[in-house]
């Protein structure tokens, strides 16, 4: 009986509890999809429903008729295609630099990053706008890509610094004795060992830049440069009561983030940390 109870508790902890949490987070996405499949002109449902009475994809067909949907999506894709790799490189280099500091200097640097992290974004909007205006880059993508040159957020740097803390000093010292420079050690020794942190930073950077609404609203004036979050805002202003259309726009905005998260999860689940050791043992 004790063995059966242990097996049951392990099954509940490993499968049932994660499934309940997954359902809790997936429920809003599902009801958003269901709302986008409702016929136009109908009011929102008064109770939860798994599927609308007469599902239709007419709302998705009407999206390109009201806003330049594919132009906005292409602009957002261009922004994230540049910003995400830059964020990963800068955050990982900065985090690796923290790893190489002495413990006292590392503590001071971490405290400084935490202090910067506590500064609200709204407190620097006016200053940033004036700097970009003086530089003559307003109404370009430069203000939208500038955060990537600063690693996006101090949190991403701290995430990498914590991950690089697991790289043994003996490996770094051995690489230095073989004549490798710090950039080579970062690229060939340290970075391959923090793959989960890299995926996490990439997903967070993608989500931030894909859903960024405030920066395009502040800096962009030309309609042909607008990313999709601004297009979704215009859609809400054009049809504030067309719930299926608004839900369809939200599904289009959310789908890339969900796909990126699922791909990152798949890579993590398929990652075998012992593969490199096994391949090295067969040489």
Image: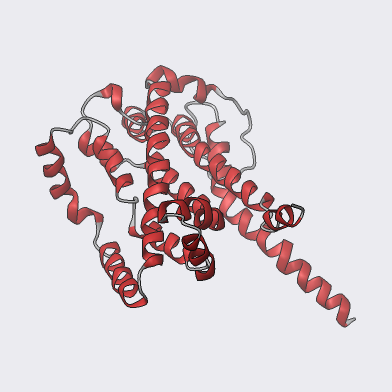
Farthest residue, direction front: 178
- Give x and y (percent) for residue 45: 53, 41
- Give x and y (percent) for residue 31: 56, 43
Instruction: Name the one closer to the observer, 13 or 118.
Output: 118
* Number of numbered discs overlaid on the protein picture: 0
Q: Quadrant of residue 30?
A: top right
Give the side of residue 132 with respect to residue 94, left or right.
left
Q: Residue at x 53, y 40 (%)?
A: 32
Q: Residue at x 42, y 48 (%)?
A: 88
Q: Is residue 136 above or below residue 85?
A: above
Q: Residue at x 66, y 57 (%)?
A: 273
Farthest residue, direction top: 65
Q: Quadrant of residue 120?
A: bottom left
Quadrant for the N terminus in the image:
bottom right
Q: Residue at x 62, y 55 (%)?
A: 22
Give the side of residue 275 with respect to residue 98, left or right.
right
- Give x and y (percent) for residue 9: 77, 73
């Amino acid at each position: 009986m004790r063995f059966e109870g242990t097996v049951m508790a392990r099954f509940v902890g490993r499968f049932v509890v994660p499934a309940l949490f997954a359902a809790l987070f997936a429920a809003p996405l599902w009801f958003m999809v269901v709302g986008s499949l409702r016929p136009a002109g109908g009011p929102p449902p008064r109770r939860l429903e798994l599927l609308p009475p007469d599902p239709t994809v007419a709302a998705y067909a009407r999206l390109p008729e009201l806003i330049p949907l594919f132009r906005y999506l292409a602009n957002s894709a261009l922004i994230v295609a540049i910003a995400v790799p830059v964020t990963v490189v800068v955050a990982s280099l900065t985090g690796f630099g923290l790893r190489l500091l002495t413990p006292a200097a590392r503590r001071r640097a971490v405290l400084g990053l935490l202090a910067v992290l506590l500064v609200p974004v709204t407190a620097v909007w006016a200053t940033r706008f004036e700097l970009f205006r003086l530089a003559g880059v307003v109404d370009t993508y430069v203000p939208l890509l500038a955060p990537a040159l600063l690693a996006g957020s101090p949190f991403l740097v701290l995430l990498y610094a914590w991950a690089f803390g697991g790289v043994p000093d003996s490996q770094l010292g051995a690489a230095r004795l073989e004549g490798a420079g710090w950039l080579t050690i970062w690229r060939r020794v340290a970075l391959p060992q923090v793959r989960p942190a890299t995926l996490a930073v990439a997903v967070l950077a993608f989500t931030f830049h894909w859903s960024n609404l405030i920066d395009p609203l502040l800096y962009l004036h030309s309609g042909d440069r607008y990313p999709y979050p601004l297009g979704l805002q215009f859609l809400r202003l054009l049809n504030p009561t067309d719930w299926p259309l608004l839900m369809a726009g939200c599904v289009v905005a959310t789908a890339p983030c969900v796909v990126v998260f699922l791909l990152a999860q798949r890579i993590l689940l398929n990652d075998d940390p012992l593969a490199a050791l096994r391949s090295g043992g067969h040489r």
